[in-house]
Image (cartoon, rainbow, N blue to C red):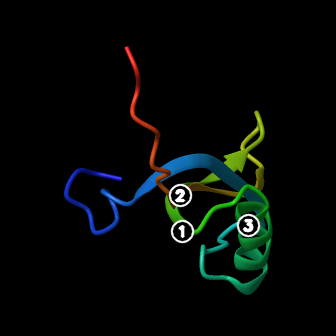
């Protein structure tokens, strides 16, 4: 999340979620959303953001499907003051 973004002060990245789907899949497709939601919730995420999407190809140029990668965010935890 870039500095100054709407949630930048309250949320932090806790992981990534990758989904393999059919070629041409979109982040808003119901089957993609269902898989992302399940994986993100399992890691405790509260927000997700699509980071990138690309078509995977074999060595001979055959489309193998679409891969969508999401960042998973959770509310920042307040750390106890560090004692020196």
User: At which x and y percent is residue 26?
Assistant: 61, 74
On-image quarter of the C terminus = top left
- Residue matched to label 1: 47
User: At which x and y percent is residue 63?
Assistant: 75, 54
Q: Which is more toward the observer, 29 or 10?
A: 10
Relative to 26, is 9 above or below? above
- Residue matched to label 2: 73
Q: Which is more toward the observer, 9 or 53?
A: 9
Residue under the image location 63 percent in, 62 percent down: 45
Q: Is residue 20 left or right of residue 53?
A: right
Structural crowding at the residue carrying mark 3, measured as other residues with C-alpha within 10 Å and reported as few (<14), some (14–19) or many (≥20): some
- Residue matched to label 3: 41
Q: Are marks 2 and 1 in contact (CB under 8 Å)?
A: yes
Residue under the image location 67 percent in, 72 percent down: 25
User: At which x and y percent is residue 5?
Assistant: 26, 62
Find residue 11 and report its image quarter.
bottom left
Q: Earlier in the sequence, mark 3 or mark 2?
A: 3
Q: CA distance from mark 3 to mark 2?
A: 10 Å
Q: Is residue 68 left or right of residue 80?
A: right
Relative to 36, is 80 above or below? above
């Amino acid at each position: 999340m870039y500095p100054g973004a709407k949630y930048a002060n309250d949320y932090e990245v806790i992981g990534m979620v990758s989904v393999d789907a059919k070629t041409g899949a979109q982040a808003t497709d119901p089957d993609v959303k269902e898989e992302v939601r399940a994986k993100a919730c399992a890691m405790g995420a509260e927000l997700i953001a699509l980071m990138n999407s690309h078509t995977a190809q074999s060595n001979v140029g055959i489309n193998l499907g679409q891969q969508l990668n999401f960042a998973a965010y959770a509310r920042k935890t307040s750390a106890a003051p560090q004692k020196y």
